[in-house]
Image (cartoon, grey):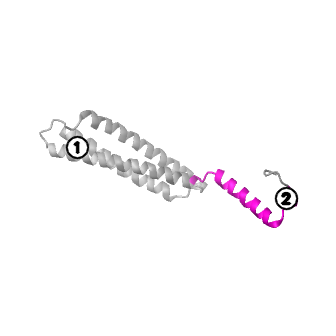
Amino acid sequence: DDFGTDASELDPSQLILKEASRAQHVSASTLNINHYTNRKSAAESMLDIALLMANASQLKAVLEQGPQFSLYTPLITLISVSLCLQILVGVLLILVVKWNLNDEGMHHQLNFIENFATGCIFNILVINVFVTAFGVQ
């Protein structure tokens, strides 16, 4: 017995309290994969929104400088691709949150979507490194 008392020594109300305590202990230590994934996706979405806003601001700055800016076309292209990929990643994260991760039949598709989203995020990172390197004055 985990709590150091024999069940035969307890009256019914104490036994109920003991079982409730044990159930609470087990549920607190068990990881709910859906809950974890939903929180992880929400955090990723918040970071995606912050980057989306930064890219929109950069796009506005480039557009305000106009076509006379020497890197106008490359920056417009890179920022636009980054924005499109960010929207795609946002949609993919919404799809992951909507599916039940406890369904074994969906694991292959979910794994593919997660890997694809990770590849898109890597591309967003590389693109934004170039956008920052080219700079917007």
Residue that numbered label 2 is attached to: 7
Dot label at residue 118 = none
Query: In the depicted view, which residue is nearer to us: 1 or 9?
Result: 9
- Count neighbours of disc 2 (C-alpha within 10 A) and say few if under 14, some if 14 to 19, many if 20 or more: few
**Side of 89 relative to 79 (left or right):** right
Q: Residue at x 49, y 54 (%)?
A: 96
| Picture coordinates of residue 122, whole percent (x, y) | 40, 39
- The magenta-colored residue range is 6-33
Residue 109 visible within the image: no
Looking at the image, is 134 positioned above or below residue 50?
above
Q: Secondary structure at mark 1?
A: helix
| Picture coordinates of residue 59, whole percent (x, y) | 23, 46
Q: What amino acid type should be assigned to the residue bearing mark 1?
A: Ile
Q: What amino acid type should be assigned to the residue bearing mark 2?
A: Ala
Query: In the depicted view, which residue is nearer to us: 130 or 120?
Result: 130
Instruction: Report if residue 21 lies within the magenta region.
Output: yes
Q: Residue at x 35, y 52 (%)?
A: 87
Q: What residue occupies the far bottom of the structure in this picture?
A: 12
| Picture coordinates of residue 100, whole percent (x, y) | 55, 58
**Side of 23 relative to 112 (left or right):** right
**Side of 25 relative to 6 (left or right):** left
